[in-house]
Image (tube, rainbow, N blue to C red):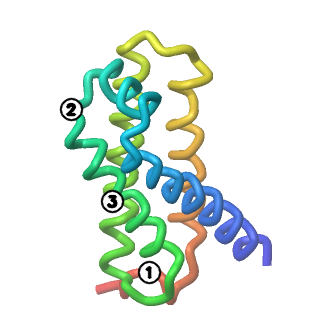
Amino acid sequence: MARTVAYWVSTGIVALMLLLALSYLTGSVEVVSGFTKIGYPQYLRIVLGICKPGAAIVLLVPGLRRLKEWAYAGVTFAWIMAFIANFAAGESPQVWALPPILLALLLVSYVTRPDQRRLPSS
């Protein structure tokens, strides 16, 4: 029971944070300037604004085992790069500390996921 709760709480938080990336598509001044400040090109904002919510959906829906593995990997890479970029840009700890916290939740989600959400052992 504790494993199931850990899975759904961590996955829910991760999915919510990934869905918030839809705001990348708005082109608001805050989002555009944030990407510029950390040195990301604006086309990456569009790519992440589509892929992060897509990963959230993949993590939440049943099935799609192989795609879930790719979603976990892609989100891991995105959040590692977010940490590095924000830290290197001199952002405050309140900004650059969020990606490692989310990575820890992503790890909990990955480790505690039910067998029907894992690739079969070969």
Q: Where residue 25 sits in the image (x, y, percent)? A: 37, 50
Task: Tell me which residue sits at (56%, 45%) in the image.
Answer: 102
**118 or 35: which is nearer to us?**
35
How many residues crowd mark 3 within 10 Å: few (<14), some (14–19), many (20+)? Answer: some
Q: Where residue 60 sits in the image (x, y, percent)? A: 53, 76
Task: Tell me which residue sits at (36%, 53%) in the image.
Answer: 49
- Tag on residue 41? 2
How many residues crowd mark 1 within 10 Å: few (<14), some (14–19), many (20+)? Answer: some
Where disc 3 sits, the SS reads: helix
- Tag on residue 20? none
Where disc 1 sits, the SS reads: loop
Label located before the other in sequence (1 or 3): 3
Task: Tell me which residue sits at (46%, 48%) in the image.
Answer: 23
Name the kind of residue labelled 3 in the image: Ile
Name the kind of residue labelled 2 in the image: Pro
Mark 2–mark 1 distance (CA, rounded to whole Å): 34 Å
- Tag on residue 118? 1
Q: Where residue 29 sits in the image (x, y, percent)? A: 42, 29
- Tag on residue 50? 3
State the quadrant of the C terminus: bottom left
Q: Where residue 58 sits in the image (x, y, percent)? A: 42, 75
Name the kind of residue labelled 1 in the image: Arg
Mark 3–mark 2 distance (CA, rounded to whole Å): 15 Å
Q: Are marks 2 and 1 in contact (CB under 8 Å)?
A: no
Label located before the other in sequence (2 or 1): 2
Mark 1 or mark 3, which is nearer to you?
3
